[in-house]
Image (cartoon, rainbow, N blue to C red):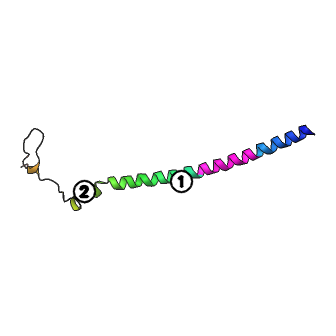
């Protein structure tokens, strides 16, 4: 009688553990899918923020910067670049 009880208790415990693990696996898969989507969205946002058009627009409109004229460019050797022919 006690052996039957132990076997029944063991089977019930194993089944409970399997159910718990399946639930945990399901939650982890959902979290993974959410994180993959979030990562994809962040990569898109990063590409948008790095775009040369956006950076140029910010530099011109917010900071008042402009593309330098060739005569305003001085290289490290100290020579002034003139306009080409």
Report the residue that reaches farthest toward the front: 2
Q: Is residue 83 left or right of 67 when viewed as pictured?
A: left
Q: Which residue is mark 2?
A: 56
- Say whether disc 1 or disc 2 marks the residue closer to the N-terminus: 1
Query: Which secondary structure, mark 2?
Result: helix
Q: Is residue 53 left or right of 8 when viewed as pictured?
A: left
- Segment tinted magenta in the rendering: 16-29
Instruction: Give the Cα distance between marks 1 and 2.
Output: 34 Å
Residue 70, percent from left and from top? 11, 50
Q: Is residue 19 magenta?
A: yes
Q: Is residue 48 left or right of 41 when viewed as pictured?
A: left
Give me the residue at 43% from left, 53% from top: 42
Query: Which secondary structure, mark 1?
Result: helix
Residue 61, percent from left and from top? 23, 62
Report the number of discs: 2
Residue 16, percent from left and from top? 75, 47
Q: Which residue is mark 1?
A: 34
């Amino acid at each position: 009688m006690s052996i039957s009880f132990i076997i029944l208790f063991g089977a019930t415990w194993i089944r409970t553990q399997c159910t718990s693990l399946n639930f945990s696996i399901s939650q982890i898969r959902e979290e993974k899918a959410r994180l993959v989507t979030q990562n994809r969205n962040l990569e898109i946002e990063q590409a948008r923020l790095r775009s040369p058009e956006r950076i140029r627009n910010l530099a011109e409109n917010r900071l008042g910067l402009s593309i330098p004229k060739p005569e305003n460019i001085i290289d490290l050797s100290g020579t002034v670049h003139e306009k080409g022919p």
